[in-house]
Image: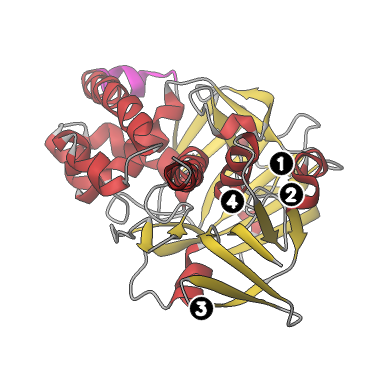
C-alpha cells in the first residue's frame, strides 16, 4: 500500500511533522522504533535522561511536552576547580557586572532577531531564512568564542556562560556556533522547566498513522520512494521526511558532511555529595572537567552528566548508589557549522537538529517539512 507521505523517525522533528500533517488531514504514516527519540523521560523515576529542559519560548516543542518543575538557573554554583568556585549571586558576579550587562544586551538583541527567524523557518527554507537577516546569518557561521570576544564579555563567559553552554551541549565555545551558543544561553534569562513526556499519549494521537519499525534503506522508484524496513517489509510514498539523528540520516541518504556530535553520559544517583557541591541545586563545570553538570532532583537524588562514560563519580560524591545510567554516544550535533539542505531532492526532506541545537529548532524543521508537503498537495488540487 502506498502512502502520500512517510515520516522516518519519532523524535521531536518527526512527531511535530506528523501532528502538523494530522491537523491538515493529510495521508501519512510515521515509522519509528522509539516514540520520543532523544527525549528519554522516565515516568517511574520522574527524570529526563535525554533532553532535560524546555524554555517558555519553545512554542512548538511544547505541543508535545508538559512542563515539569521550574528550574532556577540562579541557584547554581560555578566551578573552575574544587577550590575555585562561586555562586551566581556573589562578589565574583559583582566584579564582572559590566561584562554580564554586555552579555545581557547581546541576548536581548538576539532574542528580537531570533523570534522572527523562527517564524520564517516554519514556511521558508533555512538558507533563505538566514539570508533574510544578515545578523542571524553571521551568527550561523561564526564561532561562539569569536562572538564573545567581539562583544567583550570573555571573562564572564569563561566563568559563567560557557559553563552553562557546556552543561547543555558537551562542547566548548570553540566548537559551537554563535547562533547555538546564544540560543542555549537564552535559558539564563527565560523561564525554563524540566520535561515531562508521555509517549503513550502521543502515540494515541497518531493512532494508526504510527508504525513501529526501523527503515534500513530508501530507494527512488519512478518518481516515488520505496522504503525497506528492518524485517524486510516495504513501504511506498510520494513524499519522504527523514527525521532521524544526523548520523542515521547521513547513512540512509549517503550525505557527505554533517556536524560532529558531542558525547554525553547521564548517571542517576542517590548520593552524599562532597561539601563543595551541596549548597546549590546545580553545579556547573568548565570544559577541563569531564563532569559537566550535577543537578538535584525533586526527590533528593541527582543527575550527574559527563562527557566520558568511564568517570569516577567519587570526584564529586563522598558515597553514592547508582540508580540508572544512559549513554548518548551521539548526543547533539553541535560541533562545526556544516549545513544540510532541508529538501535535498524532489519531495525528500530532512528534519531534525542537524542545522541547529535544541528541541524547538528540531520541532520547527519538522513543521517546515509538513507545511511544504501540505502546500504542494494543495497546489495539485487547485
Q: Is residue 80 visible?
A: no
Q: Is residue 156 visible?
A: yes
Residues at badges 2 and 4 in contact (C-beta under 8 Å)?
A: no
Instruction: Give 101 or 222, whichever is nearer the viewer.
Output: 222
**Residue behind mark 3:** 221
Magenta region, main secondary structure:
helix
Numbered mark located on residue 268 in the image: 2
The disc, 4 or 3, on the residue closer to the chain's N-terminal end is 4
Q: Is residue 355 magenta?
A: no
Q: Residue 268: x, y in percent?
A: 74, 49
Quarter-wise, where is residue 338 in the image?
A: bottom left
Residues at badges 2 and 1 in contact (C-beta under 8 Å)?
A: yes
Tell me the magenta residue range: 89-97
Q: Residue 64: x, y in percent?
A: 66, 35
**Measuring 74% from the left and 78% from the top, which residue is drawn there?**
233
Q: Give neighbour class at mark 4: few <14, some 14-19, many 20+ (Cα, 10 Å).
A: many
Quarter-wise, where is residue 119 in the image?
A: top left
**Measuring 25% from the left and 48% from the top, which residue is drawn there?**
127
Q: Residue 273: x, y in percent?
A: 69, 41
* Quadrant housing the N terminus: bottom right
Kindly report the distance in space between the C-alpha atoms of the residues bearing marks 2 and 4.
Answer: 28 Å
* Quadrant housing the C terminus: top left
Q: Secondary structure at mark 1?
A: strand
Q: Secondary structure at mark 3?
A: strand
The disc, 2 or 3, on the residue closer to the chain's N-terminal end is 3
In the image, residue 111 sits, relative to residue 120, either above or below, namely above
Amino acid at each position: 500500500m502506498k502512502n502520500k507521505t512517510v515520516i522516518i523517525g519519532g523524535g521531536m522533528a518527526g512527531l511535530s511533522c506528523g501532528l502538523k500533517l494530522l491537523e491538515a488531514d493529510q495521508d501519512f504514516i510515521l515509522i519509528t522504533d522509539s516514540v520520543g527519540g532523544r527525549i528519554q523521560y522516565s515516568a517511574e523515576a520522574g527524570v529526563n535522561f535525554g533532553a532535560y529542559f524546555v524554555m517558555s519560548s519553545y512554542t512548538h516543542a511544547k505541543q508535545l511536552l508538559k512542563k515539569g518543575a521550574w528550574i532556577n538557573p540562579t541557584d547554581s554554583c560555578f566551578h573552575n576547580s574544587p577550590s575555585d568556585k562561586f555562586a551566581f549571586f556573589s562578589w565574583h558576579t559583582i566584579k564582572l557586572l559590566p561584562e554580564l550587562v554586555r552579555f545581557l544586551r547581546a541576548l536581548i538583541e538576539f532574542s528580537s532577531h531570533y523570534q522572527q527567524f523562527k517564524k520564517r523557518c516554519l514556511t521558508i527554507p533555512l538558507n533563505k531564512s538566514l539570508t533574510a537577516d544578515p545578523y542571524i546569518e553571521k551568527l550561523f557561521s561564526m564561532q561562539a568564542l569569536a562572538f564573545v570576544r567581539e562583544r567583550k564579555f570573555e571573562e564572564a563567559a569563561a566563568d559563567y556562560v560557557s559553563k552553562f553552554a557546556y552543561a547543555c551541549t558537551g562542547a566548548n565555545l570553540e566548537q559551537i556556533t554563535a547562533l547555538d551558543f546564544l540560543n542555549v544561553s537564552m535559558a539564563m534569562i527565560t523561564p525554563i522547566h524540566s520535561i515531562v513526556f508521555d509517549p503513550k499519549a502521543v502515540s494515541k494521537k497518531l493512532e494508526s498513522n504510527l508504525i513501529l519499525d526501523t527503515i534500513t534503506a530508501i530507494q527512488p522508484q519512478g518518481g516515488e520512494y520505496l522504503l525497506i524496513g528492518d524485517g524486510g517489509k516495504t513501504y511506498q510514498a510520494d513524499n519522504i521526511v527523514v527525521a532521524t539523528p544526523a548520523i542515521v540520516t547521513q547513512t540512509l541518504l549517503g550525505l557527505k558532511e554533517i556536524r560532529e556530535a558531542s558525547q554525553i553520559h547521564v548517571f542517576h544517583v542517590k548520593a552524599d555529595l562532597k561539601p563543595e557541591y551541596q549548597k546549590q541545586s546545580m553545579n556547573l563545570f568548565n570544559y577541563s572537567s569531564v563532569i559537566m553538570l550535577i543537578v538535584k532532583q525533586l526527590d533528593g537524588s541527582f543527575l550527574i552528566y559527563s562527557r566520558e562514560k568511564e568517570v569516577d563519580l567519587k570526584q564529586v560524591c563522598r558515597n553514592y548508589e547508582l540508580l540508572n545510567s544512559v549513554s548518548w554516544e551521539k548526543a547533539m550535533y553541535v560541533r562545526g557549522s556544516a549545513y544540510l539542505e532541508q529538501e535535498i531532492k524532489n519531495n525528500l526532506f530532512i528534519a531534525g537538529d542537524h542545522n541547529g541545537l535544541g528541541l524547538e529548532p528540531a520541532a520547527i524543521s519538522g513543521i517546515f517539512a509538513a507545511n511544504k508537503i501540505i502546500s504542494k498537495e494543495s497546489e495539485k488540487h487547485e
